[in-house]
Amino acid sequence: MNSSLITRRTLCLAGSGAFMLGRLPLAQAQEAKKGGTFVVGLTQAPRHLNGAVQSGFATAEPSTQLFASPLRFDDKWAPQPYLAETWKLDEDGKSLTLNLRKNAVFHDGKPVTSADVAFSIMAIKANHPFTTMMGPVDKVDTPDAYTAIVRMSVPHPAIVLAMSPALCPILPKHIYGDGQDLKTHPRNSTDVVGSGPFKFVEFKPGQRVVLERFDKFFMPNKPYLDKVIFSIQPDMASQILSFERGDMQMIQVSAPTDIARVTKDPNAVVTAKGFEGIGSINWLAFNTTKKPLNDVKVRKAIATAIDKNFITKALMGGFAQVANGPISASSPLASADVTLYPFDLKKAAAMLDEAGYKVNDGGERFKLTIDYLPGVDDQQKNVAEYIRTTLKKVGITVEVRASADFPSWAKRMATHDFDMSMDQVYNWGDPIIGVHRTYLSTNIKPIVWTNTQSYNNPKVDELLNSAGQILDPVKRKAYYATFEKIVTDDAPIVFINTVPARTVTSKKVGNVPMTIWGPMSPYDEVYLK
């Protein structure tokens, strides 16, 4: 494979028109041992196990073990064979041909065919919350049992990445095609059948998911593990104690105190690799329809009053990195040429004066509220409290509003019942999947994690809609660079930091999943030493 192809493939997030053949497995694992039970900690409880109709870590981690996908990705953003042995994205970017393995079977013994792939992709299009991911797909042709051709109305550079395990689980049509609503299908939680490396044993909501080795898995001699257990413990302190006792072999942490603690554990291996595809950003969002936040001068002044270096170094212990734009720096499509707002309280106060918001006799200009996503206080509540304090210094009184739980916070966001809000949002590998949704004016909807800022810029709409159909990686990156420059200048959001996620494993774990999807990758190559 020549370097120019690698560069092209990397820049376009594996979405170019290049003919892509299968390569070597993700890990050679020559010393891998078979057997053992791998216990993984989850802090969030999945509602069910079907990743075709539900996003998020809690669902994706068990879903990617139960369901195989057409492709998988390595740590360099390069696609790898999985259910599809070979694949080709046509030069016009409107057809993706998947040539399936002939030895893949579902856990009930029935073969995986192109009919299952076609059913699954159209089901994802109809039901998954990431509407842009399969949005351009018109249909999936099945000329024979082992060929699926994804037909799209426009060029779709993200379609290859969309074949990833966490995004495109292949469901058995003979089970899920019975006419029942896929979002509430009983087989999402009971007697789940996929074609992944592990098969279903037990799902106790809020407690655990138990899976065991699938002996007829299509990858030779895989998986190595006998069993995988996802143990659900919402309290991170309890989860770390379980890890330290040896009751768990893999957990994920992001709080600075937790990272510092596990780093000192002599039996732990801590890595920041494996989250490049997620691209998680912590940010402050504005409701741009509300006064005075409908004034870009006010938004810029608030951005200037926030010391992001203090947040990342003091509040987050130096484990986080400053974020300055809507596309995560881990993405090959990110641009460094963005509008920056260096911390300067005097300048921020002057900007507010210039915008016409003078301080009154009590030293106050106006009042605002700030909400924050519950459950991740180190990234959300602590930063919200800091913002309250720093904005007080420039005459803005801020009330920090706590939400009782995620549904309560999500309702406020969906109904646009907020002034400012802290949030954690994922890029999901390609901007088409995880970035467009926040800035397109056509995506201003009463749904959480859409354009709840009510941001409306026709030029941004034009740039994103164009970039979403460009196959040439250099040209596409240029479009996104212009987009990032405009958005950071309009400041509907203040980007604060990348979330310092870490995967923590016991030293007994071999082949730790460190692809761009990290713990959301299949565990077929993981083994216990």
Image (cartoon, grey):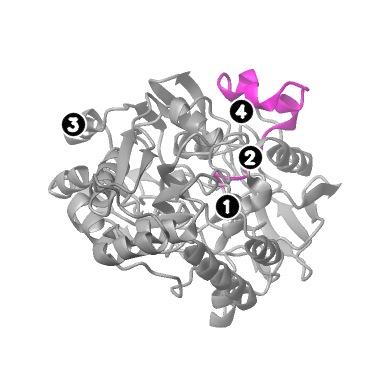
SS for dot 1 = loop
Q: Is residue 515 visible?
A: no
Q: Position of residue 485 (x, y in %)?
A: 51, 70
Disc 2 to disc 4, how far (Cα)? 34 Å
Query: Badge 2: how crowded within 10 Å, few (<14), some, or many (20+)?
Result: some
Inspect the magenta stretch and tell me whether residue 166 lies in it.
yes
Front residue (pair 220, 168): 168
Check whether the beta carbons of the residues at disc 2 and disc 4 lie within 8 A of each other. no
Looking at numbered disc 4 in the image, what kind of residue is underneath it? Val
Per the rendered image, the range of residues in magenta is: 165-191
Q: Nearer the viewer, mark 4 or mark 3?
A: 3
- The label number, if any, that marks residue 447 in the structure image: none
> Residue at point 39% right, 64% down?
354
- The label number, if any, that marks residue 241 in the structure image: 3
Disc 3 to disc 2, how far (Cα)? 41 Å
Check whether the beta carbons of the residues at disc 3 and disc 2 lie within 8 A of each other. no
SS for dot 4 = loop
Residue underneath mark 2: 445
SS for dot 2 = loop
Looking at numbered disc 1 in the image, what kind of residue is underneath it? Tyr
In the figure, 79 relative to 190: above or below? below
Q: Earlier in the sequence, mark 3 or mark 2?
A: 3
User: In the rendered image, which quarter is residue 12 located in?
Assistant: bottom right
Q: Is residue 173 visible?
A: yes
Q: Position of residue 76 (x, y in %)?
A: 47, 65
User: In the rendered image, which quarter is residue 154 located in?
Assistant: bottom right
> Residue at point 47% right, 58% down?
26
